[in-house]
Every structure is written in C-alpha cells, then in structure tokens.
Image (cartoon, rainbow, N blue to C red):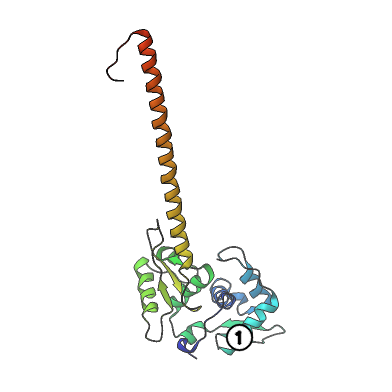
C-alpha cells in the first residue's frame, strides 16, 4: 500500500506512528514497543502538541487499523506483543524525511529551524538548508505531497510546515488569530483616540483657567 491509497489518519493514529518512530531512535533497547510503553509515549507531557490522554483500548483500536494499512507491524517475541512502525517502506521515503514527518506528527506545525533542533535525536541534519531540501522533496512528490508550507502567521519571521497524513490542514485557526489581532489593533486605536480627546479637553480647560487667572491679575498673555 502506498501513500496515494492511504486514508486520512486521525490525530491518535499519527501520534502512535510518531511515538513508534521516535522511540526506535531514542530507546532502541526497548523497541519494538509494548502496548503499555506506547500508551505512555502517546500521553507524555513533553515534546507533544497537543498533549492527549488516550486510553489503552483506544490505542489498541488504532494499532489494529494501522496494522491493516501496513503502517504498523506486530511481533510476539517473548510473552508480550510488541509493535513497530513501517513508515519508510509504506511512504517510500528515506530516513531523513521520516525523521521530519515524525517530529511534525508529534509536535504539530514547525519552522525549518525548529524541525532541525527537534529532530536532532532522530537524525542530525548538517544545516537548515538540508532540512529545507528534504521538506521541499516531500512536498513535491509525484506520489502525493506529504508536507506543506503554511501561510506565514502575523508577526512571525518564518513559515511553518505541517504534515499531510491527516489531510489538508485547517487554516481557520490562523485566520482567527489574524482577525483577533486586527480587533486588538482596532481597540487600541480607539483607546488612543479616546485618550487624545480627553487630553485635548483637559488642555482646553487648563487654558481657560489660566486665562481667567491672568485677567484677574491684569496679565495679558498673547500665547493663551
């Protein structure tokens, strides 16, 4: 089965794949993973976005589905069933690309710089341009794009990338941020206008008071 025939994966499905791929590199001695280890990896609080709280039965159901798609391989060495990923073979991508997709599945959209830093334990990219070249390759695959560059967020210096294993990303959240910032800007302008008007009124009142005082003292000030 290739990427073109894969259905869109759920958040939990990509989380399971991401954890299997990550732990293969970071804890090779305990890989393939048991169900318990996989549950712990999916629900861990660090290096995950979003943080989730999946049950063992939910993850078992996901594993069964991923096995059907050939993305997960089950082995029963010893007394415990263990699970391994099959990402590189099914998606037909090199190890470097698999490392980038793994980090995108685990941590959500990221810039090229963030991807280079966060993927260091999986693969050490020589430089930013190396990461960029693999991302471009993944986005221009004839078999179907696996990643996409998102529109730049307001105030951001770099674009973020996202994986496409769960389909096209929703840009609505980005638009909400834009509208929210525009609303904030508008309210700040209104507030500034109100403050200027209040200061102007205060200055006029002070001028009037000074003029009255000068008249009482017989002082003529042409500046007032």
- The secondary structure type at the circle numbered 1 is helix
Considering only vertical position in the picture, is 2 above or below 155?
A: below
Q: Rate crowding at label 1 as few (under 14), some (14 to 19) or many (20 or more) other CA atoms within 10 Å.
A: some
Indicate the position of residue 32 as horizontal and vertical percent values: 61, 80
Indicate the position of residue 81 as horizontal and vertical percent values: 68, 84
Pick whichever, 165 or 205, lies toward us.
Answer: 205
Residue at the image point whose x is 42% and y is 50% from the top: 186
Q: Which residue is mark 1?
A: 65
Indicate the position of residue 52 as horizontal and vertical percent values: 62, 68
Q: Residue furthest right?
A: 79
Name the quarter where the C terminus is drawn: top left
Q: Quadrant of residue 193?
A: top left
In the image, taking residue 36 as reference, residue 223 lies left or right, namely left
Pick whichever, 216 or 144, lies toward us.
Answer: 216
Residue at the image point whose x is 36% and y is 80% from the top: 140
Q: Residue furthest left?
A: 222
Residue 120 visible from this viewpoint: no
Considering only vertical position in the picture, is 73 above or below 206?
A: below
In the image, taking residue 126 as reference, residue 21 lies left or right, namely right
Pick whichever, 106 or 213, lies toward us.
Answer: 213
């Amino acid at each position: 089965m290739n990427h073109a025939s894969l259905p869109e994966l759920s958040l939990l499905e990509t989380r399971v794949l991401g954890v299997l791929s990550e732990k293969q590199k970071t804890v090779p001695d305990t890989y393939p993973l048991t169900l318990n280890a996989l549950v712990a990896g999916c629900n861990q609080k660090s290096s995950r976005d979003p943080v989730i709280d999946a049950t063992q039965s939910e993850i078992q159901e996901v594993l069964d589905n991923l096995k059907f798609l050939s993305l997960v391989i089950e082995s029963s060495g010893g007394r415990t069933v263990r699970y391994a990923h099959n990402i590189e073979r099914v998606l037909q991508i090199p190890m470097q690309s698999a490392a980038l997709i793994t980090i995108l599945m685990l941590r959500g959209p990221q810039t090229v710089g963030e991807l280079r830093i966060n993927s260091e334990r999986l693969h050490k990219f020589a430089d930013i341009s190396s990461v960029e070249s693999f991302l471009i390759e993944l986005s221009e695959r004839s078999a179907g794009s696996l990643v996409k560059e998102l529109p730049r967020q307001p105030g951001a210096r770099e674009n973020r990338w996202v994986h496409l294993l769960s389909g096209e990303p929703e840009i609505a959240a980005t638009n909400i941020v834009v509208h929210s910032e525009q609303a904030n800007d508008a309210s700040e302008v209104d507030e500034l206008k109100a403050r200027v008007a209040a200061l102007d009124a205060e200055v006029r009142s002070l001028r009037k008071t000074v003029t009255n005082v000068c008249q009482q003292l017989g002082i003529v000030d042409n500046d007032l």
